[in-house]
Image (spheres, coloured by chain):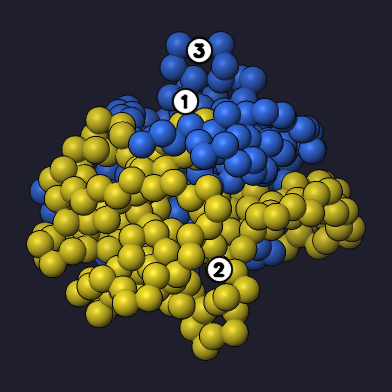
Chain colours: A yellow, B blue
Amino acid sequence: MNFEEKVEKTEPIFHGHIMDVERETVQLPDGQTATREIVRHAPAIGILALTTDNRMILERQWRAPIGQTTLEIPAGKLDARDKNDRDSAEHAAIRELNEEVRLQPGHLERLYGFYSSVGFSDEYMTLYLATELTPVTTELPRDKGENLEVLTPTLDEALQLIENGQIEDAKTIMAIQYWQLMTKK
Amino acid sequence: MNFEEKVEKTEPIFHGHIMDVERETVQLPDGQTATREIVRHAPAIGILALTTDNRMILERQWRAPIGQTTLEIPAGKLDARDKNDRDSAEHAAIRELNEEVRLQPGHLERLYGFYSSVGFSDEYMTLYLATELTPVTTELPRDKGENLEVLTPTLDEALQLIENGQIEDAKTIMAIQYWQLMTKK
């Protein structure tokens, strides 16, 4: 089966700080024309960070798109500070752990990567497992307006937070499911 | 801790077919001002659909944001056909299974809901488990340009597709992890 949609025209819609939006006119495999609305977003990382007493790092923070707080694993976008490195996603993971929770991992392992919502966005996130956490020696500056409360639930507590709807963030549910699978092996 | 960001101004940026984009000016808890770029998107559903011989339904399709095909569980947005129902997400799940793979579930169960990328979008997806699948009696029309190839891997095959990077879609990885956890219980 031929799936390819040929891009006939790309129209820039919006150039923002955290995203660009564009509209593509594409030719479908059957020759018909259609439009596609696309959000371009920087690559990102998320971290399943486990303490030595087997608790996970969670952050409560305000999220403007839904006008309420969420519980999420440490995460962030790759930016100019990461791009000159051999493995920029790994660098971003270490940097975000420092900025957000002042911890550094003795062990950092890539679990897998995924598109967060590939129907309309190209955002690609790499999920890491971070263990052997110790306090950082040099604290990196935080982003303006980054207000965080840190929680450290056990696996059972984290599963309960999904069950009762307090955790409704995709990458965080993925990380907790992965942790549960690790534990069952 | 006070997290709330008060919205001082909302500026519409783009009104599209599948999303709206807006820029908010907000007052942070410390009194400083910041801007937030937000994608408004319809609620959506995804379906872990398991056949009677214990295989999952996967679809290969073209995704314009990344210019390549993906392997994903059946999924879709809620639309006008769903909104008058008591449980519109459930209705959308049944409709998408019909449109995309011509199957109807004897059993349909809500697993959990999640924001796909809450840093920039309000898209909320409900994940369902569908079993006791039988062919539909009435086929609903497909969306224009919806070219699909259907695959039915076993759990081991699906895990292999994550491992080798052929599955890189968040909701699909969530569904497969859930399936693996169901199987281990």
Q: CA distance from mark 3 to mark 1?
A: 9 Å
Q: Nearer the viewer, residue A103 or B119?
A: A103
The reply to whether residue B148 is in sight is no
Label 3: element kind: loop
Task: Report x, y in % for residue A169.
Answer: 40, 44
Q: Is residue B162 above or below residue A105?
A: above
Q: Chain of mark 1?
A: B
Label 2: element kind: loop
Left/right of residue A145 with respect to residue A18 in the rendered view: left
Q: Chain of mark 2?
A: A
Name the residue tied to disc 3: B85
Give the residue drawn at x 65%, y 48%: A120
In which quadrant is the N terminus of chain B drawn?
top left
Label 1: element kind: helix
Task: Report x, y in % for residue A138.
Answer: 37, 76
Q: Is residue B108 above or below residue A176?
A: above
Query: Does label 2 lie on the same chain as label 3?
Result: no
Which circle, 3 or 2, is nearer the viewer? 2
